[in-house]
Image (tube, rainbow, N blue to C red):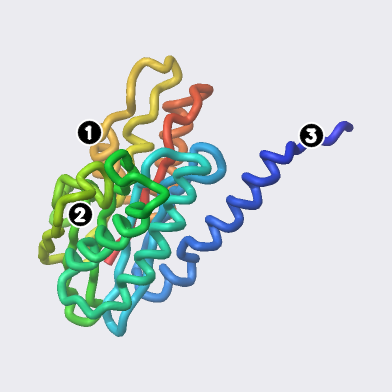
Amino acid sequence: MLQPIITEHESSLIYAQTIQNGLLPKARHFDKSIKDYFVYYKPQDKIGGDFYWLTSKEDTLYFALADCTGHGISGAMLSVLGISLLNYVIQKNFDQVGDYLTELDKKWIETFNNELNDSQYNNDWLEITIISFNTKTREFQYACGGGEFAIYQNNTMTTYKGNNYPIGGWQIEKNRTFDTYHITLEENAKLYFFSDGFKHQFDSDNLKKFSRKKLLHILSCYQAASMKEQHELLEFVFNTWKEQTPQTDDVSLIGIEF
């Protein structure tokens, strides 16, 4: 039986995939502080511009999901930059998570504002949602740079947004700040973070997108299932919806129960 020939490009993508996956949080990082969770992460072509990030400082857990410009190699390089900058800014002692995004925005802009790159024409950006959760006091904060997320509690699914502008982009010359919001999380609250990939996926006839409304409806309907079961159901729904249609974008959908 003939073995499939792996091109040099494919070999490079596989190697890059190993590196990118190595930068993402592992199961043990989630298990340490989170009651239950699932991660549905499916780049369009092995590597991509979506990434998720998790860390903690004393009793406070920090989590972020981001969607960078583009996908493939260019998106993956931006995701590596985003992870690196988050690891840098989180070392600062801010009381509000929005301040971390403000600092991230400044560092992102500094990266592209150099003599070899005319910032006037640069439109590299990332949409991001970041949260903090104190495991002792249950204090919860969030900030968004163009992103959104949903919380299911009290038998209701509610979506939350913050600032409409992303990190970086053509607004590069503006002195932006990112707002912090506080929410009371009930026991067993379930949070869902998602990029555009799932809701923008075309169906098997390549005529209709899945849609944000349908995604939130399905998440609401699956609440009786465990996070693991939800992951399996969502993967089945996604694959059934698209069938042979090419994947439209990087897909990231993460559920966390506190």
Mark 3 neighbour class, 10 Å CA radius: few under 14, some 14 to 19, many 20 or more: few
Secondary structure found at label 1: helix
Decide which of tag 2 and tag 3 comes sooner along the chain. Answer: 3
Q: How far apart are labels 1 and 2 at the CA level?
A: 20 Å
Query: Residue flagged by tag 3: what amino acid is it?
Result: Pro
Amino acid type for the residue under numbered disc 2? Cys
86, above or below 93, in the image: above
Q: Which residue is the site of mark 1?
A: 213
- Quarter of the image containing the C terminus? bottom left
Q: Residue at x 53, y 45 (%)?
A: 47
Q: What whole-number distance in Å separates the C-alpha atoms at marks 1 and 3?
A: 41 Å
Answer with mark 1 or mark 3, whichever residue precedes in sequence: 3
Residue in the image at 29% along x and 37% along y: 215
Relative to residue 199, is residue 64 depicted above or below? below
Q: CA distance from mark 2 to mark 3?
A: 44 Å
Give how far across and how far down residue 132 sits, in percent: 24, 69
Q: Which residue is mark 2?
A: 144
Q: Amino acid at mark 1?
A: Lys
Q: Quadrant of residue 46?
A: top right
Front residue (pair 47, 233): 47
Ranked by sequence position, the earlier of labels 1 and 2 is 2
Residue 158 at least partly seen: no
Q: Which residue is mark 3?
A: 4
